Image (cartoon, grey):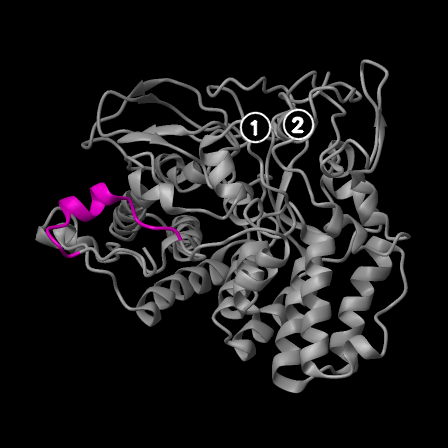
Amino acid sequence: MKKIFILALMSCGILLGSCEDNFDPTITGTLAPANFPKTEADFELYTLQAYKPFGAKWGYADVAWQNMFHGYEYGHVIMFDLPTDLFIPFTAWGGFFEFFSKADFDFLKNQDKTSHFEKVRYVTRMTQIIADIEASSLEEEAKQRFIAEARMGRGLTMYYLLHMYGPLPVIMDPAEIGTAAESDLSRPNRETFVGYIEDDLTYAAEHLAVSPEQYGRFNKGLALGILMRLHLNEKNWESAKAAGRQLQGLGYSLYNDYAGLFREITEKNLETIWAVSIDPAATGNNLQGDFNAWPLYNLPSDFQGKNVNGGWPPMGVFTPSWEFYDSFDPADKRRALMVESYLAKDGTQKDRSNMPGPVLAKYPDESGPEFQGNDIPILRFADVLLMLAEAINNTEGPTQEAIDLVNEVRSVHGGIAGLSESETASPEAFNEAILRERAFDLYFEGVRKMDLVRHGKWESALQQAGKNPGPALFPVPQYAIDVSDGTLSQTQGY
């Protein structure tokens, strides 16, 4: 089994034993603070909590029901891709699907403790775990490895929170846990919060393995890649370049079959730096491994798939716009993962005349019959090359190296020619070309909103797509402001 089994540890009443090579637990004893964690095996299991928010399931229980960052509802794709210019509004189900698809985030003010705001508790938990590891009698190598996993999870969580709400109050000092400091919900300034993320990801990059023994664990490339994204979005171009240069030396390369990056049979390749490890045997039961439900969200109900008998009615939640589809070079292989026409199950021919947009088929339904076994890439080397080109362009202009990086992605993944002279004639023109190329290669991978914000195009791009966007960040839920005694400020613009 390729899955990571994420075991949610609670303060009492939990049974556990050892962890096998595939992270499946063997239940053998009872936990208590006096006897757990003590051994290296104990701490390995204890540290698995770091992975808890990063699976692909419906969610998990923690104070209240919590959605996962890479899950299907309130996950990275619905938060950072669906609201953008690449996808059309989805009104059929109403509710948060419609609000996200229209880039109208005001509804999140009324969210309860299912809000991602509650992930500040996860940050505190990682801070405690890190302190417990540091205070243990483990060998130094094991300490560093477990701390790196906890800091990777904490840093990635804060990275996502930054792009949802802006800086949030977090506990980074274990001495503050259980004290009045937890009641102070004042936001730190951006520099301080970004510094927390940078420190965590830098430590993780120094101590995580490039290729961990167990597939699915955090790795050095992921830490460097998220650090690179952080620097790029903060426009710390030189630091972004430095992280990119390190990634170039880790042995990654582009995979020459773009569609194969999202197929179960070829999901392990030299391009995918880190992915959510999906269990092909999972059936959507939250007690099983992570599952891939994307075809159910993407295929129209009348679409006859290979194994999925149509998606959930009536149409795909994630439907690209025809404008985005038409912006591709017709010869671009990456466009083929969007279906322009099909024969419906009732025999009706579906095409541009009666389709609101192409069918998104980036994750093929090759297992099933409902939930798929395809891993879900979170960071790929193509992203790194495009980020590096952008960082170079913003410090040195459109150098030949930067142009070659973009053209390599176009050639290997799209099978198309390099950029034109006009597209690389100036730093401004090249930035525009890079932004387009990122859309072509990374659509439906949860990075578009950050890209638009970084390029100063959040409002203009969405307005051009017919949307009426509000602020790019989310409001914090009102309940959090109410219990903060006036220390937590609302996100600017709400």
Whether label 2 touches label 1, CB < 8 Å: yes
Q: Is residue 229 above or below residue 328?
A: below
Quadrant of the drawing holding the N terminus: top right
Please check the rendered image and state whether residue 242 is part of the magenta-colored stretch, yes or no: no
The residue pinned by badge 1 equals 92
Three-letter amino acid code of the residue under disc 1: Ala
Where does residue 483 sit, x and y in percent of width and height?
Answer: 14, 44
Where does residue 391 sit, x and y in percent of width and height?
Answer: 62, 75
Quadrant in the rendering for residue 298: top right
Q: Nearer the observer, disc 2 or disc 1? A: 1
- In the image, 256 versus 173, the foreground residue is 256
**138 lies left or right of 405:** left
Where does residue 30 sit, x and y in percent of width and height?
Answer: 27, 20
- In the image, 99 versus 359, the foreground residue is 99
Three-letter amino acid code of the residue under disc 2: Met
Quadrant in the rendering for residue 51: top left
Element type at mark 1 = loop
User: Which residue lies at the image location 53% right of the left edge and 33% below the top edge?
Assistant: 72
**Mark 1 residue crowding within 10 angstroms, few (<14) / some (14–19) / many (20+):** few
Q: Label 2, label 1: how many angstroms apart (C-alpha)?
A: 8 Å
User: Which residue lies at the image location 42% right of the left edge and 57% below the top edge?
Assistant: 471
- In the image, 406 versus 458, the foreground residue is 458
**415 lies left or right of 384:** right
- In the image, 455 versus 460, the foreground residue is 460
The residue pinned by badge 2 equals 315
User: Which residue lies at the image location 72% right of the left edge and 77% below the top edge?
Assistant: 429
Where are the magenta residues, as a range? Answer: 474-487
Q: Is there any visible trace of residue 217 in the rendered image?
A: no
- Sooner in the amino-acid sequence: mark 2 or mark 1: 1
Q: Is residue 182 above or below residue 297?
A: below
Q: Is there any visible trace of residue 439 in the rendered image?
A: yes
